[in-house]
Image (cartoon, rainbow, N blue to C red):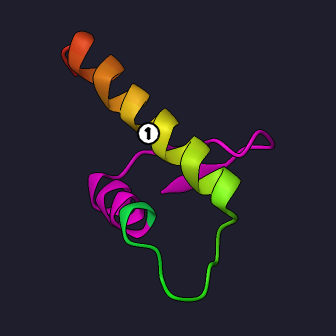
Amino acid sequence: MATLLEEGVCIIKDKEVAERFLKDLENPPKEPIISEEIRLKSRRLLKEGIEWAKKMKL
């Protein structure tokens, strides 16, 4: 399950959805669905979230 917040941050609670979202960010479709700015911000924040989860041992 994913929730889009006003800041363009996506909170993803399901591992399968998170992996699919990350895959779409890394290999965008030919026709952009998400603006490049949101794509870059989401990718950065998702990686920061993964690092935070590792530090918290989640």
State which quadrant residue 55 falls in: top left
The residue closer to the viewer here, 42 or 14, is: 42
Query: Residue tagged by mark 1?
Result: 46
Most extreme residue toward the top, as rendered? 56
Q: Give SS at disc 1.
A: helix
Most extreme residue toward the bottom, as rendered? 30
Quarter of the picture holding the C terminus: top left
The residue closer to the viewer here, 54 or 44, is: 44
Q: Which amino acid type is marked by label 1?
A: Leu
Location of residue 26 with respect to 9 vertically, above or below: below
Give me the residue at 60% from left, 88% from top: 31
Packing grade of label 1 (10 A; few <14, some 14-19, many >=20) is some
Location of residue 36 with respect to 12 vertically, above or below: below
Is residue 50 found inside the magenta-colored segment of the image? no
Instruction: Give the percent coordinates (x, y) of residue 25.
Output: 44, 62
Instruction: Give the percent coordinates (x, y) of residue 52.
Output: 34, 18
Left or right, 15 with reference to 2? left
Give me the residue at 66% from left, 52% from top: 38
Q: Which residues are magenta?
A: 1-24
Left or right, 35 with reference to 54? right
Instruction: Give the percent coordinates (x, y) of residue 18.
Output: 36, 54
Is residue 16 found inside the magenta-colored segment of the image? yes
Give me the residue at 18% from left, 15% from top: 57
